């Protein structure tokens, strides 16, 4: 039996709808009309012989088959984009010092940078992972060429590249205590962390008793405390590691904006290709929304 080939154009529309949450928003992101997106999804469903979305008058949701297809679709699109870029991108060579905030997509960063290295083998990429404020300071001192880190609400420095929803997370068996009996235990990075500041502000505004019981300069240390059931913490949804789940019933944390800092004069011809590569990879593999 010969199976049908999956059309990458149809898959790209499918991934856009899944990421944007609507046909209209997906059309806007891809420069297509809502009806054109609908036709592409209909054609995809005909090819695979499965429904990929459940539609209501107010919302859409992935079916179980749609969830399975989304995993493969993102992988296929990422591989396609890598192959095309490798073949048609102009050759580049040089040395680029990149700082990346550890709070975002830590388990996905290494594979993305590995693909970049394969696509641009003549580029020597030196990566430093750390806290946003420290990486930005290193950029200001000329120790890094650019840094990708968090940008606080209302801040205008840097160029936004994507946004992500934040979540309260804890161990699979963690049950938030009754705030009248015991404060909510928190695991946080040291003072100055944007996630820490937002979490404490929201808990205070909602009169929810809380206390920081674990502080670590390392994100891995904070995650370990949460995985052990010792406390809850705040992470981006795409960064959720094994052993952690979202904790319901707490104030909504909103979104965080990631931006690129440094190289304000555009001295490095490597910056734009690298940032574009990271943005496209995150959109294809994780569905992270590019910043406006």
Image (cartoon, rainbow, N blue to C red):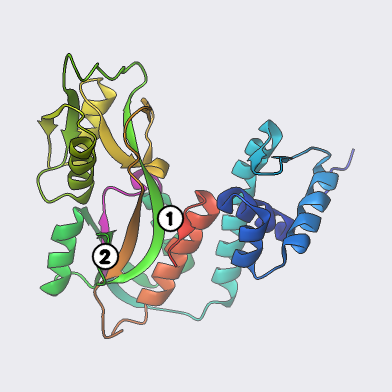
For residue 249, say whether it is visible: yes
Q: Nearer the viewer, residue 153 or 13?
A: 153
Q: Quadrant of the N terminus?
A: top right
What residue is at 26 percent from the left and 72 percent from the top? 156
Q: Name which of mark 2 and mark 1 comes first in the sequence.
A: 1
Which residue position holds label 1? 112
As drawn, is 7 to the left or to the right of 288? Answer: right
Which residue position holds label 2? 154
Give the CA distance from mark 2 to mark 1. 29 Å
Q: Residue furthest right?
A: 1
Q: Quadrant of the C terminus?
A: bottom left
As drawn, is 47 to the left or to the right of 263? Answer: right
What residue is at 55 percent from the left and 63 percent from the top? 82
Q: Which residues are magenta?
A: 97-108
Q: Position of residue 166 (x, y in %)?
A: 35, 44
Quadrant of residue 232 in the image? Answer: top left
Q: Nearer the viewer, residue 151 or 285?
A: 151
């Amino acid at each position: 039996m010969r199976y049908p080939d999956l059309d990458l154009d149809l898959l790209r529309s499918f991934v856009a709808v899944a990421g944007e949450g609507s046909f209209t928003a997906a059309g806007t992101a891809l420069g297509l009309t809502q009806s054109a997106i609908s036709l592409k999804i209909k054609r995809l469903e005909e090819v695979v012989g499965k429904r990929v979305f459940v539609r209501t008058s107010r919302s859409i949701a992935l079916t179980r088959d749609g969830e399975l297809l989304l995993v493969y679709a993102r992988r296929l699109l990422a591989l396609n984009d890598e192959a095309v870029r490798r073949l048609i991108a102009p050759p580049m060579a040089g040395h680029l010092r990149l700082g990346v905030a550890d709070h975002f997509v830590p388990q996905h960063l290494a594979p993305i940078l590995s693909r970049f290295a394969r696509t641009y083998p003549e580029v020597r990429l030196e990566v430093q992972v750390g806290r946003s404020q420290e990486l930005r300071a290193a950029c200001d001192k000329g120790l890094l060429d650019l840094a990708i880190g968090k940008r606080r609400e209302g801040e205008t420095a840097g160029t936004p590249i994507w946004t992500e929803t934040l979540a309260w997370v804890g161990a699979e068996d963690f049950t938030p205590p009754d705030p009248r009996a015991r404060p909510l235990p928190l695991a946080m990075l040291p003072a100055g962390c944007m996630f820490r500041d937002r979490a404490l502000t929201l808990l205070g505004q909602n009169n929810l008793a809380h206390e920081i019981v674990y502080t670590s300069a390392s994100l891995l240390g904070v995650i370990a405390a949460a995985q052990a059931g010792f406390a809850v913490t705040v992470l981006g949804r795409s960064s959720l590691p094994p052993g952690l789940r979202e904790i319901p019933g707490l104030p909504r944390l909103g979104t965080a904006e990631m931006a690129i800092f440094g190289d304000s004069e555009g001295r490095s011809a490597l910056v734009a290709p690298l940032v574009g590569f990271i943005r496209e990879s995150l959109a294809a593999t994780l569905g992270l929304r590019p910043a406006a």
